Amino acid sequence: MLKLEDLTLRLHPADNVVVVKRPLKPGVELESGSLRLALAKGIPPGHKLAVAEIADGAPVTKYGQTIGFAKGRIAPGEHVHTHNVGLRDFGRDYAFGVDARPVAYHPASAMRQFQGFSRPGGKAGTRNYIGIISSVNCSAGVSRYVADRFRGPDFARDFPGIDGVVPFTHKIGCGIQPGAPHELLQRVTAGIARHPNIAGYVMIGLGCEVNQVHLVAEAHKLQQPLAGEQPPTFLTIQTS
């Protein structure tokens, strides 16, 4: 017999349903304390499983809230979904969250600390890099060339506090397929730009590619620096 807690998630102690975490086959037997359940039918992940008898018309509770009403008797171990749960008007208690209490944080002297760099938005970095980000494979060579210009022996003296200038290049972006592939590239590029270990960055494009620099900036609001954020520099080779 399998443990109910291993295969389901109970979102509130008062719930009469739990959420199934992985597919459950017909005939599976579950236990939790004195509760014993035998599944007559399979239940897919993400769906609800009754852990108590729910009478016809009685509330179905999840998150400690009424999410619907039984359209007939629901026995413990039954699949609970749209086929046996309906909606209707009822008196609602909007006093949710009343049990929330302020967190009693440890005093600053008792908190663990590390040497890092405070970033906008409450983030913290452990490195202080300048990023040279290529928006397209066509500008990868230029991005690497720019970064290489800062690899001299006097870098640490001329730029104290900066760990290095790092090129971020890739092999796509020129004729990339619109939709998910393009959006993924933009999301990754913007994620690098706002990574906590990046103190500032320059984004370089060619000018005729699909993944234009200004499109990346507009899609992820990179042209609108957060409070305290170093304003970025955007360059397009064909217009520079």
Image (cartoon, rainbow, N blue to C red):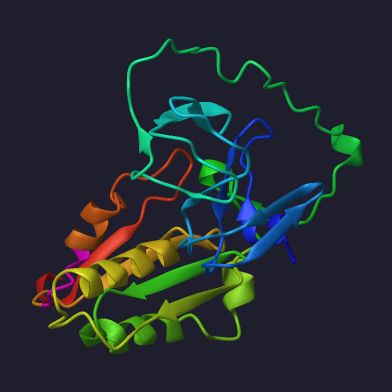
Q: How many marks?
A: 0
Q: Is residue 189 above or below residue 5?
A: below
x, y percent for residue 96: 56, 18
Q: Is residue 211 magenta?
A: yes
Quarter location, residue 233 = bottom left
In the rendered image, the quadrant that contains the N terminus is: bottom right
Q: Is residue 84 magenta?
A: no
Main secondary structure found in the magenta portion: loop
Q: Nearer the viewer, residue 122 or 152?
A: 122
Quarter location, residue 185 = bottom left
Query: Is residue 185 found left or right of 71 in the rendered image?
Result: left
Residue at the (57%, 70%) spot, across then down = 158
x, y percent for residue 196: 55, 58
x, y percent for residue 19: 55, 50
Residue at the (62%, 67%) spot, across then down = 28
Residue at the (81%, 50%) spot, across then down = 113
Residue at the (49%, 13%) spot, across then down = 94
Query: Is residue 176 found left or right of 167 in the rendered image?
Result: left
x, y percent for residue 210: 12, 74
Q: Nearer the viewer, residue 183 or 83?
A: 83
Query: Is residue 50 found left or right of 215 in the rendered image?
Result: right
In the rendered image, the quadrant that contains the C terminus is: bottom left
Q: Which residues are magenta?
A: 209-213
Is any part of residue 126 visible from this angle? no
